[in-house]
Image (cartoon, helix red, strand yellow):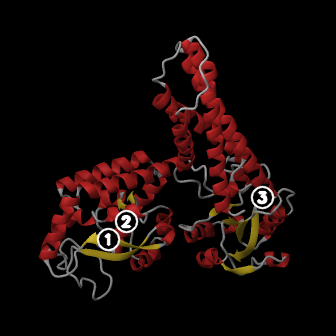
Amino acid sequence: MGKRGLVILYVMADLAATAIAWALFFLFRKVYLEPIKFGHKVPLEVDPHFWLGMAIIPWFWVGLFLMIGGYSDVYRRFRIKELGQTLLISVIGTIVIFFVLLLDDTIAGPVYYYRSSAALFLLNFSFLFLFRFLITSRTVRRVHDRRIGFNTLLVGGNERAIAIHQEIESMPKSPGNRFVGFVNVNGGDQHLAESGLPRLGPWDGLRTLIPEHAVEEVIIAVESSEHAHISKILNELDGAAVRIKIIPDMYDILAGSVKMTSIFGAPLIEVNPQIMPAWQFALKRLMDITFSVLALIILSPLLVVIAILVKLGSPGPVFFRQERIGLSGKPFRIIKFRSMVADAERHGPQLSSTSDPRITGIGRILRRARLDELPQFWNVIKGDMSLVGPRPERQHFINEILKVAPHYRHLHKVRPGLTSWGQVKFGYAENVDQMVRRLKYDILYIENMSIAVDLKILAYTVIIILKGDGK
């Protein structure tokens, strides 16, 4: 069964589990709670409210699992994680249903609120965890039996690489690594080829090799004397959609840097932990869509006025579209109100400045208030961008930035934004040097990403727009 099929299986199991739980909860109320309330037995009749609940309630639970990442990375799920997530979801879901549906019930006494909530919680938790436990256990067995694996690339071909390769391959219960080959860090570390693992080239070709071999995990196995290479390797891997792990030294182990997620796995340090919890990413995306749709509706009269002014201000189209680089290094077409003359880049890519003669009269006003960026709400709705995130750049300037700041690729871990910490603190960059100086704010944002930080940046952006202080 493929990943998509397994996701569908989890969804169907959750729908079935919560539908059964809701039916039994309905029975619990009819057989136990209502006779106490009315003082006599109540006929067991299925009313329209029951069917409405059966149609809506299970999808409510699926939505909760979706928000916390309950359907993501389905081949890497494990039973303890299922227990924790199902317990959390059951608590949240029970509280929401209690306050939305059950609080208005007329009951025999306050104690029956607790009994009602406890019954709802136990029924949902029991069936959800049972069904998920069975599915996850089957997947875990298939991973341990090597029927499911994650294409893995080793960086390094020395004795450490040989040792970790042999250790993982000889494990009775596989952690899921399926080695596709290795890349060498220097000309001499090619001993791993003697074990039959193919050499795919030098380490600086990683960005090409990863999509070519559908690599999902990279293990960096370099000698202690070669640790200077690690930062270069990590920069090369930045933005790639892979898990990165490093073989630790004894110091790392004693310092507590090595965190084990499976007793069957090799001791490795995961370099790229989750930036934000899955539920915050889901909430961030929900905020993006909701705010952008509302903004386009509410601001539609202003958008029409700006479009007319742009058209009357200078010859050329109302909107300006340009290719930018987004999440995981994928290109997309950004849309803005045109603020420059139509043929502004006839001599090639150029950055603008405050005194740029290419900027039109109306364009100068739009840029100061950031109103030229308003059409990008459409990019946000499409999923190309987020409300808050590093500003997207063109590949031409990214290549220039990478020459002096290889860690720029770190920005491709998240969706680019309509506004950013760097934009708020620094404004528009007029040259590559200013782009590099603004970069530190965007790196800080990624390392401190949260819904709270997003709200602060949005608030400061609104202040800049109202004051017209953009540059």
Is residue 145 in view? yes
Q: Quadrant of residue 371?
A: bottom left
Q: Residue at x 69, y 78 (%)?
A: 186
Q: In the rendered structure, are the residues bearing label 2 and label 1 in contact, judged by CB atoms less than 8 Å apart?
A: yes
391 shown above or below 346: above
Q: Is residue 469 above or below residue 83?
A: below
Amino acid at circle 2 = Asn
Residue at the spot x=61%, y=75% of the render?
211
The disc placed on residue 406 is none
Asked if residue 317 lies left or right of residue 407, the reply is left
Is the residue under label 1 in contact with that under label 3 (CB below 8 Å)? no
Instruction: Name the residue carrying label 2.
Output: 379
The mark found on residue 143 in the picture is 3
Residue found 80% across the figure and 66% down from its top? 165
Camera-nearest residue between 351 and 342:
342
Give neighbour class at mark 2: few <14, some 14-19, many 20+ (Cα, 10 Å). many
Picture quarter with the N terminus: bottom right
The residue singled out by tag 1 in the image is: 335
